C-alpha cells in the first residue's frame, strides 16, 4: 500500500471510528432522543445497550493493526447496523424526515 493510500485509509478509518464510538456511547447512556427514536421504530430499549457495546467493540477491532479477519467482521457489523437503521426508518415511514429534523429545524 502506498503512503498516500495509507493516509486515506487511516483518515477514513478514524472518521468512521469516531462516528461509531460517539453513537455507541450515546446508545449506552440512553440519551432521551435515542430512546424516543428506538421506541418509535418499535424496538425494545435494551437494544440500545447491545448496539452500543457492539459498536465500541467494533471500533476497537477496526483500530487494532492486526487480526484482519476480526477487522473484516467489524466492518461487516457496521454495515449491518447502518443498513438496518436505514431500512428500519424506511419501514417506519419516516424516511429522510428524521435526518431533516435533526439538521434543519
Image (spheres, helix red, strand yellow):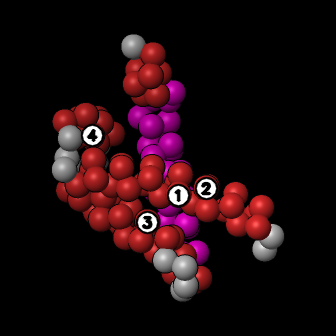
Q: Earlier in the sequence, mark 4 or mark 1?
A: 1
Residue occupying image coordinates x 50% and y 36%: 90
**Relative image position of residue 2 (x, y in whole percent):** 80, 70
Q: Which residue is mark 3?
A: 59
Task: Report, in whole angstroms, how far the alpha carbon at label 4 lies from the one at label 2.
Answer: 27 Å
* Residue 61 shown left or right of residue 53 in the figure: right
- On-image quarter of the C terminus: top left
Q: Nearer the viewer, residue 6 or 75?
A: 6
Which quadrant would residue 10 be assigned to in this image? bottom right
The residue under label 2 is: 11
- Residue 69, position as x, y percentages in the image: 57, 83
Mark 4 or mark 3: which comes first in sequence?
4
What separation in Å lies between label 2 and label 1 (alpha carbons)? 5 Å
Secondary element under disc 4, as helix, strand or loop, is: helix
The numbered mark at residue 14 is 1
Q: Position of residue 20 (x, y in %)?
A: 43, 54
- In terms of depth relative to the viewer, which is nearer, 2 or 34? 2
Q: Is residue 25 magenta?
A: no
Please give the range of residues in magenta: 72-97
The residue labelled by disc 4 is 34
Instruction: First in sequence, mark 4 or 2: give its number.
Output: 2
Single out the mark in the foreground, 4 or 2: 2
Task: Say whether residue 84 is visible.
Answer: no
| Quarter of the figure that contains the N terminus | bottom right
Amino acid at each position: 500500500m502506498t503512503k498516500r493510500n495509507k493516509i486515506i485509509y487511516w483518515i477514513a478509518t478514524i472518521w468512521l471510528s469516531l462516528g461509531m464510538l460517539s453513537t455507541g456511547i450515546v446508545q449506552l447512556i440512553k440519551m432521551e432522543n435515542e430512546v424516543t427514536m428506538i421506541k418509535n421504530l418499535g424496538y425494545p430499549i435494551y437494544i440500545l445497550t447491545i448496539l452500543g457495546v457492539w459498536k465500541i467493540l467494533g471500533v476497537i477491532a477496526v483500530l487494532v493493526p492486526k487480526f484482519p479477519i476480526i477487522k473484516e467482521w467489524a466492518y461487516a457489523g457496521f454495515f449491518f447496523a447502518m443498513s438496518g437503521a436505514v431500512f428500519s426508518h424506511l419501514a417506519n415511514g419516516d424516511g429522510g424526515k428524521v435526518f431533516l429534523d435533526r439538521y434543519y429545524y
